[in-house]
Amino acid sequence: MYETIKKYINTFSVTGREYYLANVIEADLKPFATEIRRDAMGNLIVFKKGADSSKKLMIAAHMDEIGFMVTNITDNGYIRVTNVGGISALFSSYGLVKFENGLKGVIVADSSAKDIKVKDLVIDIGAKNKKDAARKVAVGDLCALVPSFTRLMNKRISAKAFDDRLGCAVAAVSAMKSTPKYDTYYVFTVQEEVGCRGAMPATFDIRPDYAIAIDVTGTGDTVGARAMEIKLGNGAAVKLKDSSVICSQLMVDAMTECAKRNGIKYQLEVLEAGGTDTHSMQLAAGGCHAGCISIPTRYIHSPVETVDLGDVEACESLLTALVNEGVE
Ligand SMILES: [Zn+2]
């Protein structure tokens, strides 16, 4: 798991450019899949045939991460950007960014104002002027924060983009290990960070009976956190609600019963903000029973998202048990 996470974190995958990560995941899962394909949007669909083909289970983890897109270059050679997804100017400023072509820059605020917005940020790539910068960067180019994968105390790790490379790692490791009861589609989705977009056409295509998203959720154990029961180290989080979905009770019961049966540590999640692919899968086509296994994560959408590896492993154990035993 640890090595898979590290590999996925170090792969460029800003929303709209997920194919680099799709290539890495496809190579990892080829030996384990009945069939692998991609749709027009770029979703990677890994199919594993089940013992019983009367039902379909779809699993979704999003490959994209938040980042920046170039809007223009100043006469002095600074790069102006807009946000791709909910990236924070405060969290990102005075950090390092990397473009799709490997070019690096430092991202700074153009003023000392406290409430800086993305429009107040500029990227300094070391260019002497606009012409010099334009040799390396064009309008529409994408960049992301530079990966910073760090081991902390107590099996805890920190990096950018755990949202949702951890979900991808959980789904990928599960796809390597599982023996599905029902026909199972592990879908690595695109464009979640701009409105849960990729999961919708994939769900229309697959028409699952049951759907499980794997994504991160916030915790109530950080300094200044809004009251929330979720804590790092307390196991996989079974989502009840976020601002995009009320999970199917059938899925919540299936997850908690499965966790109890298999001795997997779990906690119940009510997230007062945020949305996930659960939403798109629940509403697409004729609708389906949708739920979500969440990975408790501190400082979401920052360069130092922090998790407990034990929780990540609990999420994978729960997902694999659900795939093997069936939802009902
Ligand atoms: Zn996410």
Image (cartoon, rainbow, N blue to C red):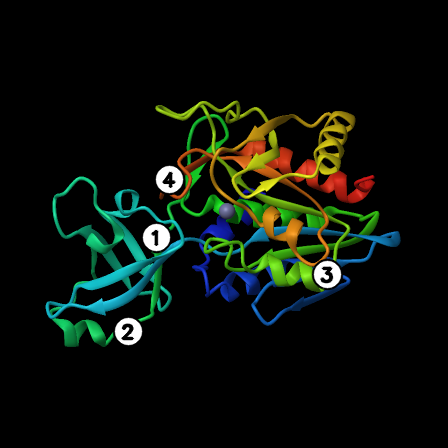
Mark on residue 146? 1
Q: Quadrant of the C terminus?
A: top right
The residue type indicated by label 4 comes to Val
* Rendered image: mark on residue 206: 3
Mark 2 or mark 1, earlier in chain: 2
> Real-space Cα distance between discs 4 and 1?
11 Å
Who comes first in sequence, dot 4 or dot 1? 1
Calculate the distance from the C-alpha at mark 2 to the C-alpha at mark 1.
Answer: 19 Å
Q: CA distance from mark 2 to mark 4?
A: 28 Å
* Percent x, y of residue 307: 48, 34
On residue 304, the disc is 4
Circle 3: residue type? Ile
Query: Contact, CB < 8 Å: mark 2 with mark 1?
Result: no
Q: Earlier in the sequence, mark 4 or mark 3?
A: 3
Mark nearer the viewer, 3 or 1: 3
Q: Position of residue 239 (x, y in %)?
A: 61, 35
**Which of the marked residues, 2 or 3, is nearer the chain's N terminus?**
2
Look at label 2 and name its amino acid: Ala
Q: Relative to 229, does residue 258 appear above or below in the rendering?
A: below
Q: Earlier in the sequence, mark 3 or mark 1?
A: 1
Q: Which residue is mark 2?
A: 138
Disc 4 to disc 3, C-alpha distance: 35 Å
User: Residue 284: image x %, image y %?
Assistant: 66, 56
SS at mark 4 in the image:
loop
| Residue that appears at 26% across and 73% down | 136
Q: Kindly indicate whether the residue at mark 1 contacts the one at mark 4 (C-beta within 8 angstroms).
A: no
